Image (cartoon, rainbow, N blue to C red):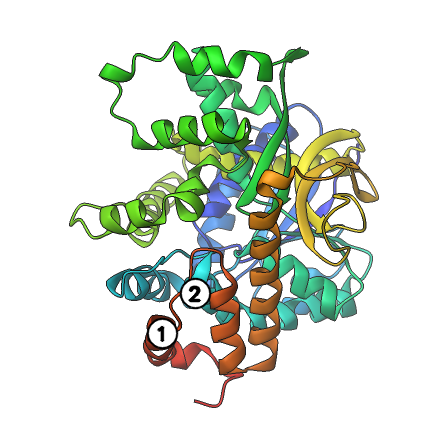
């Protein structure tokens, strides 16, 4: 098909490397050839680095696409067929406070859920609203793909303030795909070929159907778990997912997020350990590896993408994979965040739900998923309300709404503790919250 114009907002992010890798793989097949990618970022140096790197790889591999860094937002957006948003207001420093302050008080601290998710939304909201209105002004016909966290909340805000054709993405669905690869002894690269039909809201979804090469996998899940040699398995995440399956008869869609909803106390205990996994630290390490690699490839005759992306390539696979499906009108399935409008029959129409959709040149055409089982419905409804209250709090600049939104998350029950955490996070983030009277 003819080339497209793609604008990436936050194009200086280290995640852009993953996206460029997958985009280039589509160009190599002949799809998306002749395309132009415009990178816009407040860090102009990083955007230029990614552009120079990508153009070096394109030249070395004789791939027909070009990448430009553009410091002017309107110029970056002009003529775009697709606009991709991947921004993080406040960067890794503010994420580190979101992770540490709540857990120091004995409650959940994670960038998209609970009180930390509320504060991330509050930081993101002014920039997201400004960018969304700029897209609507400059390229109103563009399809907007949101990859900025908290994905469901950002998509909801965009739907509230514009009439843009917008979908949200999250690679959380790869959790259940990777799980099935592990249980079936498949290479992790096969995850992209496992069809997981999930339903719920971002980071709180349930897998209603699973297929691989035409086979319904659900009848095998129980026996696959039982075949695990649990005496020789040191994988708490796998054990917890198994327990969820035993008691609910369903697999979570975003298996990674199971602990943030159903094993909160265990998470908080683990997080207090000196060597605990922290997303802020992991992202710093990734960026510390990717940027030097990109610099090292500029101008080389054999320039190439980093060989050590590992599972992180899923970010690009889903991001550019969904764009490819729409640009080429493939009518293939993708998991997206969209306004419900009856797709899940026992959830509010205005909810932003995460469900399968057929991807066409007009955007995402959601599946009708029917009702969620009663066993999980309450948890999903509470999480949806938490998300929508968070957006209202972020837009209104209302501290009481922040507390209400944080308390709406299912695992938060102690108001006194929450007020202390909110006060401390307002102090840590005050420079990034212009809409609040602080």
**Who is closer to the viewer here, 258 or 265?**
265
Disc ID at residue 243? none
Residue 372 percent across, percent down from the top left: 68, 39
Is residue 3 visible to us here?
yes
Is residue 303 visible to us here?
no
Q: Residue furthest left?
A: 274
Quadrant, the N terminus = top right
**Who is closer to the viewer here, 387 or 138?**
387
Residue 161 percent across, percent down from the top left: 73, 70
User: Left or right: where does residue 247 sit relative to residue 427?
Assistant: right
Residue hosting label 1: 425
Secondary-structure class at tag 2 = helix
Secondary-structure class at tag 1 = helix
User: Left or right: where does residue 3 sit relative to residue 391?
Assistant: right
Ranked by sequence position, the earlier of labels 2 and 1 is: 2
Residue hosting label 2: 115
Residue 86 percent across, percent down from the top left: 54, 55
Q: Residue furthest bottom?
A: 437
* Circle 2 residues within 10 Å: few <14, some 14–19, many ≥20: many
User: Left or right: where does residue 420 sit relative to residue 179?
Assistant: left
Residue displayed at 24% across by 63% down: 104
Q: Are marks 2 and 1 in contact (CB under 8 Å)?
A: yes
Residue displayed at 71% across by 29% down: 31
């Amino acid at each position: 098909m003819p080339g497209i114009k793609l604008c990436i907002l936050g194009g200086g992010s280290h995640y852009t490397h993953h996206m460029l890798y997958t985009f280039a793989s589509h160009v190599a097949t002949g799809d998306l050839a002749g395309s132009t990618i415009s990178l816009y970022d407040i860090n102009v140096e990083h955007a230029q680095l990614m552009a120079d790197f990508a153009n070096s790889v394109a030249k070395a591999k004789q791939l027909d696409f070009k990448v430009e860094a553009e410091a002017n937002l309107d110029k970056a957006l002009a003529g775009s067929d697709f606009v991709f948003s991947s921004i993080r207001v406040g960067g890794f420093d503010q994420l580190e406070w979101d992770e540490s302050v709540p857990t120091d008080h004995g409650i959940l601290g994670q960038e998209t859920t609970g009180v930390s998710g509320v504060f991330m939304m509050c930081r993101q909201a002014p920039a997201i609203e400004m960018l969304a209105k700029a897209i609507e002004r400059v390229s109103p016909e563009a399809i907007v793909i949101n990859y900025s966290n908290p994905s469901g909340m950002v998509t909801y805000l965009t739907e509230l303030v514009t009439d843009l054709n917008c979908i949200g993405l999250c690679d959380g669905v790869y959790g259940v795909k990777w799980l099935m690869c592990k249980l079936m002894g498949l290479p992790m690269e096969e995850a992209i070929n496992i069809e997981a039909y999930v339903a719920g809201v971002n980071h709180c979804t349930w897998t209603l159907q699973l297929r691989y090469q035409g086979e319904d996998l659900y009848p095998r899940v129980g026996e696959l778990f039982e075949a695990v040699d649990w005496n020789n398995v040191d994988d708490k995440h796998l054990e917890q997912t198994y327990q969820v399956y035993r008691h609910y008869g369903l697999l979570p869609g975003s298996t990674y997020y199971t602990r943030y909803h159903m094993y909160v106390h265990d998470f908080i205990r683990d997080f207090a350990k000196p060597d605990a996994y922290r997303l802020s630290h992991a992202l710093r390490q990734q960026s510390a590896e990717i940027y030097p690699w990109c610099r090292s490839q500029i101008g080389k005759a054999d320039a190439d993408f980093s060989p050590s992306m590992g599972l992180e390539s899923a970010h690009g696979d889903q991001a550019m994979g969904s764009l490819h499906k729409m640009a080429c009108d493939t009518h293939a399935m993708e998991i997206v965040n969209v306004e419900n409008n009856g797709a899940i029959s026992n959830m509010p129409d205005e909810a932003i739900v995460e469900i399968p959709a057929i991807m066409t040149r007009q955007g995402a055409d959601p599946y009708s998923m029917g009702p969620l089982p009663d066993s999980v419905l309450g948890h999903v409804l509470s999480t949806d309300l938490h998300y929508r209250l968070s957006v209202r709090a972020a837009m209104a600049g209302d501290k009481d709404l922040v507390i209400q939104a944080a308390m709406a998350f299912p695992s938060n029950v102690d108001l006194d503790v929450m007020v202390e955490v909110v006060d401390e996070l307002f102090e840590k983030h005050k420079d990034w919250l212009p809409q609040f009277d602080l």
